Image (cartoon, rainbow, N blue to C red):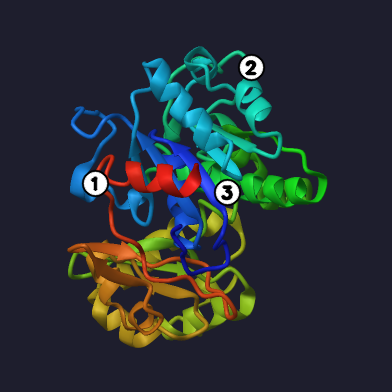
Amino acid sequence: MQTKQGPLSGLKVLEIAGLGPGPFCGMLLADLGADVVLVERGAQTADEIDMGAGAIYKRGKRSVGVDLKSPEGIQTVLSLVESCDALIEGMRPGVMERLGLGPDVCLARNPRLVYGRMTGWGQDGPLAQAAGHDMNYIALAGALWYAGQPGQAPIAPPSLVGDVGGGALYLAIGLLAGVMNARTTGKGQVIDAAIVDGCAHMQNLLLSAKAGGQLPNERGQSGLDGPHWYNTYLCADGKYVSVGSLEPRFYALLREKLGLGDDPETANGYNPKTWPQLREKFASIFARRTREQWCEILEGTDACFAPVLNLDEAADHPHLQARKVFDRENGMLQANPAPRFSGTPAGRPGPLPVRGEHTEQVLRDWL
């Protein structure tokens, strides 16, 4: 039996190979010590969802090759279901039922099973059967509305807000909560993790601001998408920096660092009517120096500043290096497991499995 290091050591998770948030959830659980067994098509079968040597989301998992179109393959999966704590699947609603691996069948084989279902729109509702991707889900949930500059099309970091934030992380929380409950009651259940639901739930901080009258529906009028003190700026070298000096004391320090301490025009920075012209003023100031020069002036201060880095630059930044946030495993830049545990630290990320390489081992261990 495989033993892994981390707070989830001993947790057994069966993951049906899929796209995006489901595999990311499985990686997160594997990073924290769970024994995640990935059910993939046969070892020699071409597969559109296989990213080969670049599939970081497979790290630390064990791969079993199964033909889900054969009765023998379905029986193999059901046998594994009997031994696991949780299952992850990301098919469109109804697909697992048609395969003979739906929740009713699996829970009949293992009443303590926590059956995790990852979709964009959810298991029911008018859009349940429609295709979609990260941007569609966050757009419908309202999370894309404030992402960008007023007068410009909203844009968000790809796959982070929806697939990862509202999807994979909510599925992980749901699975772990379900497992805790099953260990107390002996009863499993189905987790309907819809990205659109998770994205909506993540916005309760914003909805608090809206309820307090601080978040109007008009773009460019809120502290999220309009102010000069919460923005990104182009520097003299073509690179960017970010400032987020929301609180008055931080804004006062930013003004001082920019040489605007005595400037009456920027003194009242919280009037939305002044934001367009003050954004232009700040843009002209930041354009006078390189990103590195602004880092020397602002980084590490309470002006709420950070350079906008690409992934390779981020991996080389002294703060992230000191915390060992990134590393190179299997010849690829990867982020190390998070969060961090003092008593049960996670081990180093596991290797990427070759499809089907652990079939015999897993069948021996789990059955």
Q: Which residue is mark 2?
A: 125
Q: From where the camera sits, is residue 357 visible?
A: yes
Of pointers 2 and 1, the one earlier in the residue sequence: 2
Residue type (three-letter) at the residue carrying disc 1 = Val
Between marks 2 and 1 in the image, the one whose residue lies nearer the viewer: 1
Q: Which residue is mark 1?
A: 354
Residue type (three-letter) at the residue carrying disc 2 = Gly
Between marks 2 and 3 in the image, the one whose residue lies nearer the viewer: 3
Nearer-the-camera pick, 129 or 289: 129
Q: Secondary structure at mark 1?
A: loop
Q: Could you say which quadrant of the image residue 285 lies in?
A: bottom left
Distance (Cα) linking label 2 and label 1? 38 Å
Q: Residue at x 66, y 29 (%)?
A: 107
Q: Residue at x 56, y 25 (%)?
A: 121
Q: Residue at x 38, y 65 (%)?
A: 281
Distance (Cα) linking label 3 and label 1? 24 Å
